């Protein structure tokens, strides 16, 4: 494995499979234990550097690091020197001086983790950068698919929604392709980037045409405000054309699953009855997020201290 | 003043001759000239070109003297072989009054390394709302002839039309930064395969091409001169070619970085490669080189844009756009145009001196190398290759996109009206 996890392309098929297998082993090791904790990263320091509010991702990483017995520091943009205008580089040098072994970074600017990685000696894990990537989300999604369907090779995954602004979509397209799945993107053309044709994925505009051929439907969060920039005419029209409701869900093959990275806009991209159905893996994804992130931290930081 | 005898230089790459520089002018050209009291400059094998003229330089003074001053930028220019540079108007305060352009002009005179020719803002405060006092700037000591809101597009078509018309009264030209602002909100890099993957908001080629198409039609309609700054796309070259074939009075420049670099550079997320307009694709680079070779693009304009370290050492999105260019412009042209045989030395002189001087209506620059002409000259060793070290640059800033690249060509000497500003590859002052 590379020293950092900045984007899904940092993982080849063997690396990605190793992360998923490791996550499964960790889950097994902890199953039924009273104390849900492994001593692996004792004495190591993991910093959660969050420039964007994301309670769920931060908590997931925090729990992952703590279950590996690492010391965890939460460094959020609010209430720290960052709000006083400290540069990313100065923050990086500060963390470096404090001896951070791993930095988990969430930032609104695409590429911020790449910059950070050039300034710190420890491992950098991208926890979501702008509209670029969110590789651990893709790993937990792959883990969830494999767990539910038993395989990834040849699995038909349809990703629906605001692909243009989605780091989840970018990471999933890359990682699922690496792992042998067949990805189809469905969105209004305004929410697909110019250049999407070069991605290892099929592209379509008609959700109803794709659903019967989908083993997995992954719904992306769509912000209602997008209609103010004319990406679509109204939330109602978006929902009618691209929302997943019970009628559409019925068109899926019998064992198909429905995923969502959260947080959901119930009634917008996904109907409540779909989100709460047996096909939905949404709660499972959250649980799998912790074991997958434990696997990533373990594999990046688990070697002997430098 | 000291007289100089330049021995064995090749004017425009022709046969080696001696050039006698006396009292600021070229006094004689011939074989084995001798002149008592003249200082000899050995120029065996060097190419002699007319002093280079830049239509597009950011000197940052007044306002951001931490990034560049008129003096440090002038020194960088001289080391790059330039004898005249046009200083863009986006300073703080903006160069939108006679007072500010005269201040910049005077600072240039005091530095005495190149002729600093101020560009006047088209609109007050670069705000794109109402015309600045263009006539006052034209009539000032700075003799402004080029007007530009560079950094911003004069996007209001009615205002652009009036500006084009108005400057005809003093033979001025509007240099347009062609960027339809509604198509580039939040734009970070060229919109294409790479921006899609990198998650950086795209700057579509059409945002440049749409403005150029509009403006050549306006220039034709009102019979005015239009200059297009930093052309960056293949489509823009096509539109310019079409406009010129119709007889529109349009000229255009291309930057060294758009001749050499592509959006591949953005893969590093290193903001030293963030620039506006953005680095484009291989296809665009090829079209720009061909356009410069066939004269569709008239000039190389550096868009030298110094930035302080803290404005570049950051996340891509929060970094300021722009890169250094003065000291490597000629080297890039040698690498991309001369060595591949697209342009000979006469062509280099034409695109980097003659035409830009004509566009800016500069007397005394872009002249032939001939007796009686002002001795604005540069001597170039075209074969020496060296690796660019930002720390060694004369600019106060370090944001060179060529750091670590090996480039051909070394400016050995530059003369401004007979006075050397560079000798032995070093600035004289």
Image (cartoon, rainbow, N blue to C red):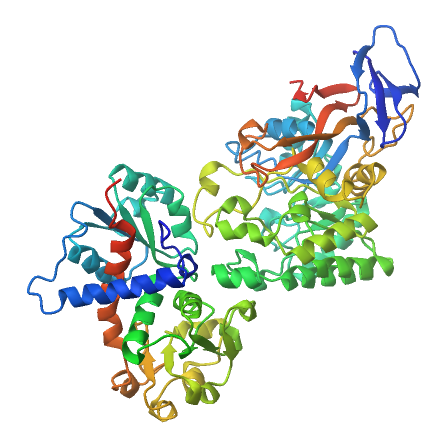
Residue A238 percent coordinates (x, y): 44, 82
Q: Give whichever of A175, B26 is nearer the camera.
A: A175
Above or below — where is B39 with respect to B277? above
> Which residue sits at x=54%, y=60%?
B194
What is the residue that sits farthest to the top in this orientation?
B36
Is B277 displayed left or right of A229 in the figure?
right
> Which residue sits at x=79%, y=16%?
B42
Q: Count the numbered circles shown.
A: 0
Residue B141 appears in the figure:
no
> Which residue sits at x=39%, y=92%?
A251
Residue A123 appears in the figure:
yes
Is A195 displayed left or right of B410 in the figure?
left
Q: Give whichever of A114, B306 is nearer the camera.
A: A114
Is B236 displayed left or right of A188 in the figure?
right
> Which residue sits at x=73%, y=47%?
B253
Name the quarter where the C terminus of chain A is drawn: top left
Residue B348 percent coordinates (x, y): 80, 39
Which quarter of the figure has residue B221? Answer: bottom right
Q: Give whichever of B407, A299 is nearer the camera.
A: A299
Q: Give whichever of B163, B81 is nearer the camera.
A: B81
Is A96 displayed left or right of B142 in the figure?
left
Residue A160 percent coordinates (x, y): 42, 78
What is the residue that sits farthest to the front in this orientation?
A14
Residue A144 percent coordinates (x, y): 29, 73
What is the residue that sits farthest to the right in this orientation?
B30
Above or below — where is A43 with respect to B239? above
Which quarter of the figure has residue A36? Answer: bottom left
């Amino acid at each position: 494995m590379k020293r950092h996890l900045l984007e899904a392309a940092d993982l080849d098929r063997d690396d990605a499979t190793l992360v998923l297998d490791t996550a499964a082993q960790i889950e097994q090791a902890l199953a039924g234990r009273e104390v849900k904790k492994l001593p692996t990263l004792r004495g190591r320091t993991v910093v959660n550097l969050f420039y964007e509010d994301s309670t769920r991702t931060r908590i997931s990483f925090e729990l992952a690091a703590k279950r590996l017995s690492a010391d965890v520091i939460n460094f959020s943009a609010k209430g720290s020197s960052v709000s006083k205008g400290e540069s990313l580089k100065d923050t990086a040098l500060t963390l470096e001086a404090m001896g951070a072994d791993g930095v988990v970074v969430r930032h609104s600017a695409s590429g911020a983790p790449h910059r950070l990685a050039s300034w710190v000696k420890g491992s950098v894990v991208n926890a979501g950068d702008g509209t670029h990537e969110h590789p651990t989300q893709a790993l937990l999604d792959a883990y969830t698919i494999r767990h539910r369907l038993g395989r990834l090779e040849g699995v038909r995954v349809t990703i629906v929604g605001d692909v243009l602004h989605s780091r989840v979509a970018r990471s999933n397209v890359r990682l699922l392709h690496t792992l042998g799945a067949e990805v189809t993107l469905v969105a209004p053309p305004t929410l697909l980037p110019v250049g999407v044709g070069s991605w290892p994925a099929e592209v379509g505009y008609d959700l109803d045409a794709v659903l019967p051929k989908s083993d997995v439907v992954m719904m992306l969060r769509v912000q209602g405000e997008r209609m103010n920039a004319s990406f679509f005419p109204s939330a109602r029209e978006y929902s009618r054309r691209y929302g997943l409701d019970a009628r559409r869900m019925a068109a899926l093959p019998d064992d198909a699953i429905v995923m969502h990275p959260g947080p959901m806009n119930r009634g917008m991209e996904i109907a409540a009855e779909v989100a709460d159905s047996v096909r939905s893996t949404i709660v499972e994804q959250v649980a799998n997020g912790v074991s997958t992130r434990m696997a990533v931290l373990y594999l990046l930081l688990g070697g002997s201290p430098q | 003043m000291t007289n100089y005898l330049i021995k064995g230089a090749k004017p425009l790459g022709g046969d080696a001759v001696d050039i006698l520089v006396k009292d600021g002018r070229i006094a004689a050209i011939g074989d084995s000239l001798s002149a008592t009291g003249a200082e000899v400059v050995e120029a065996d094998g060097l190419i002699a070109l007319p002093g280079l003229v830049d239509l597009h330089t950011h000197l940052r003074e007044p306002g951001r003297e931490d990034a560049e001053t008129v003096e440090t930028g002038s020194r960088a220019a001289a080391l790059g072989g330039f004898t005249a540079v046009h200083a863009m108007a986006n300073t703080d305060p903006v160069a939108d009054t006679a007072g500010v352009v005269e201040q910049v002009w005077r600072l240039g005179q005091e530095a005495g390394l190149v002729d600093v020719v101020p560009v006047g803002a088209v609109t007050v405060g670069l705000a794109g709302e109402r015309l600045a006092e263009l006539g006052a700037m034209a009539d000032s000591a700075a003799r402004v002839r080029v007007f530009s809101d560079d950094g911003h597009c004069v996007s209001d078509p009615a205002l652009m039309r009036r500006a084009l018309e108005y400057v005809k009264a003093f033979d001025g030209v509007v240099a347009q930064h062609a960027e339809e602002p509604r198509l580039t909100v939040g734009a970070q890099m060229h919109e294409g395969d790479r921006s899609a993957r990198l998650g950086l908001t795209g700057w579509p080629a059409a945002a440049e091409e749409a403005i150029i198409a509009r403006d050549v039609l306006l220039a034709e309609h009102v019979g005015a001169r239009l200059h297009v700054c930093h052309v960056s796309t293949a489509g823009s070259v096509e539109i310019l070619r079409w406009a010129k074939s119709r007889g529109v009075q349009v000229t255009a420049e291309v930057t060294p970085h758009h001749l050499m670099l592509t959006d591949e550079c953005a893969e590093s997320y290193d903001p030293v490669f963030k620039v506006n307009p953005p680095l484009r694709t291989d296809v665009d680079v090829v079209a720009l080189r061909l356009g410069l070779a066939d004269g569709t693009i008239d000039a190389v304009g550096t868009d030298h844009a110094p930035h302080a370290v803290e404005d570049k050492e950051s996340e891509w999105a929060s970094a300021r756009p722009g890169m250094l260019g003065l000291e490597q412009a000629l080297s890039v042209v040698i690498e991309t145009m001369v060595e591949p045989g697209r342009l000979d030395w006469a062509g280099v002189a034409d695109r980097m001196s003659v035409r830009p001087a004509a566009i800016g209506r500069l007397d005394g620059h872009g002249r032939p190398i001939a007796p009686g002409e002002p001795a604005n000259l540069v001597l170039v060793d075209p074969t020496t290759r060296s690796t660019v070290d930002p720390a060694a640059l004369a600019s106060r800033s370090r944001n060179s996109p060529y750091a670590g690249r090996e480039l051909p060509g070394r400016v050995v000497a530059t003369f401004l009206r007979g006075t050397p500003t560079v000798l032995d590859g070093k600035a004289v002052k």
